[in-house]
Amino acid sequence: MTLTTNSTLLSGIIDTLRRNDMPEHTALVRVIDACSEPGTEGEALRARLFSAAREAARSSFGRRIYVRGLIEFTNFCRNDCLYCGIRRSNSHAARYRLTPEEILSCCARGHELGFRTFVLQGGEDPYFTDDRIVELVRAVKRSYPDSAITLSIGERSAESYRRFREAGADRYLLRHESANPAHYARLHPAAQTFAARRRCLHELKAAGFQTGAGMMVGTPWQTTDDLAEDLRFLYELQPEMAGIGPFIPHHDTPFRDIPAGSVEKTLVMLALTRLMLPRVLLPATTALGTAAGDGRERGILAGANVLMPNLSPPGNRKKYMLYDNKISDGHEAAENLRSLKERIAGIGYEIVTDRGDWT
């Protein structure tokens, strides 16, 4: 197709999304492919798409970029997802669990730096029962009542989610990974299903959580049809948060030889998500920063408005290796917040450390 044809198609997609409607599937597939192409035509289309996404983000949030303090508190996991470096079958992973005291120490350091949201993320570790998570959430809330707590600890029961919410947790991140059940099945063991993941997401919303979904871009066997279906799933779910980053392989997984996902296509998916969900909290993910040195900045310029610097103890950060070369120091480290602020100011945005609640 010519640039003029693709440009017209993109204009139609942007207009449709701005009206809070969902574009036709085939048109969305064509636009994702056209905008992701290398060369001058793809660059021109991306420039238009990213400009529209920045306009949508600024209309809702101005030039404010919210930061969340990430605490990766356990890398034990009962699951065996084929893409994940902390999967159960990886005998080379250096396993660890933080104690409640260590987690509270991370929060203390983060609170002193100005963070008002803590993201407690871990594998699906059987040690951290519902009772232990409830106790942990209550302890953080007692110490830092002005701060929001985000949990990212996988699939639990509806009763578990209700208890976590009542204990004081505010948000919950659970990527849907793939809205195509057949594709989802190729990324996970048979015991894990998209039906269960979808049920959990709806139960999280029913429990009153600000809920986050999302997916990786470039996973094995993923097609553009799958990505368009992912967007439709997000539109129907209406999450308050969406985590979208490129697939990056880990050397101790079955997908070790699969090429990493495209940074450009990831940015296209971020921009389309921003237009589709103008109020969504949309991170420029750690994976994006790992895949490209300027990935965080490019993510913001494509419509992202959240960063998650790492508050975990420095000695544990390299052990939470979901994929190869995952960044955890430098600008990714919470203690370097000042330099991160300067870097983001360089592209015309301002980092703010308040809760940044979804409204």
Image (cartoon, rainbow, N blue to C red):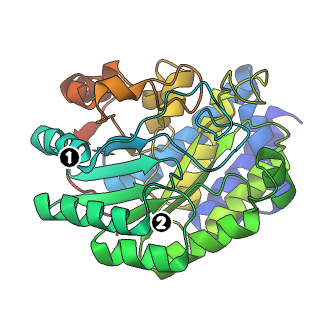
What kind of residue is marked 1?
Glu
What kind of residue is marked 2?
Thr
The residue to which callout 2 is attached is: 211
Q: Position of residue 248 (x, y in %)?
A: 65, 28
In this rendering, the answer to whether 198 lies above or below 87 is below
Q: In the depicted view, which residue is nearer to us: 220 or 312?
A: 312
Q: In the depicted view, which residue is nearer to us: 169 or 246?
A: 169
The residue to which callout 1 is attached is: 101
Q: In the figure, residue 258 lies in which quadrant?
A: top right
343 left or right of 265?
left
In this rendering, the answer to whether 215 lies above or below 34 is below
Q: CA distance from mark 2 to mark 1?
A: 27 Å
Q: Is there a contact, CB below 8 Å, between mark 2 and mark 1?
A: no
Q: Residues within 10 Å of mark 2 (few under 14, many from 20)?
A: many
In this rendering, the answer to whether 196 lies above or below 305 is below
Mark 2 residue element: strand
Q: Considering only order in the chain, which callout, 1 or 2, is on the residue closer to the N terminus?
A: 1
Q: Residues within 10 Å of mark 1 (few under 14, many from 20)?
A: few
Q: Position of residue 84 (x, y in %)?
A: 64, 37
290 left or right of 92?
left
Q: Position of residue 327 (x, y in %)?
A: 45, 23
Q: Quadrant of the C terminus?
A: bottom left
Mark 1 residue element: helix
Q: In the figure, residue 87 lies in which quadrant?
A: top right
231 left or right of 149?
right
Q: Is residue 358 visible?
A: no
